[in-house]
Amino acid sequence: MLHSQSSRVGSLLLLLAAAIGFAVALYAWLTPLTGVTGTIGAMGVAIACVVLAILTFLLRAASRRGPRIFLIIVTLVVLFGIGFAAALLHQYIITAAMVVGLIGLIALSSNSARHNQRIKA
């Protein structure tokens, strides 16, 4: 398991993005006059944010190269999917949170690349 500073920051940014996305999507789904009250899209974004948090923990725990690359790609797809869905729902705070999550994923995956180079050398 990686424990460097960029790995911690990347994980925290991904979890922060998931938490903000979940909270805002749940607020939009429950609160009247948000424009997306009770819609399946808002609930789908909230559920996808929970999946993003789970992927973050799985990515943090993955140590082998193959599963790590797979989880990075799946996390990237989920980030883009949530960001796009949030933009369609006019919930731009969630889209901005997913950009923060993307920065966290980049920090987490660049640390992974450096860790793999050290192992090969």
Image (cartoon, helix red, strand yellow):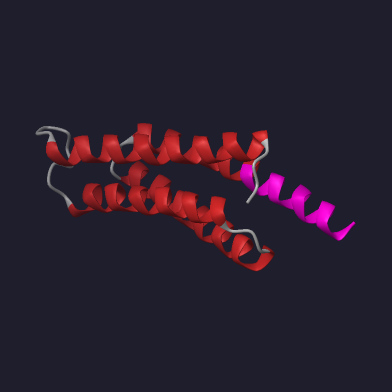
Residue at 30%, 49% (x, y): give it: 45
Instruction: Assess whether residue 119 is covered by the magenta stretch.
Output: yes
Residue at 90%, 56% (x, y): give it: 121
x, y (%) of residue 97? 43, 35
Decide whether the magenta segment is chiefly helix, strand or loop: helix
Left or right: where 95 falls relative to 110? left
Furthest-left residue in this view: 32
Left or right: where 106 falls relative to 29? right
**Visible residue check, residue 56:** yes
Q: Nearer the viewer, residue 64 or 28?
A: 64
Q: Nearer the viewer, residue 87 or 55?
A: 55
x, y (%) of residue 30? 13, 39
Residue at 35%, 39% (x, y): give it: 21
Residue at 70%, 45% (x, y): give it: 111
x, y (%) of residue 56? 48, 49
x, y (%) of residue 40? 19, 54
Left or right: where 67 falls relative to 117? left
Furthest-right residue in this view: 121
Q: Is residue 77 above or below residue 34?
A: below
Chain part drawn in magenta: 108-121
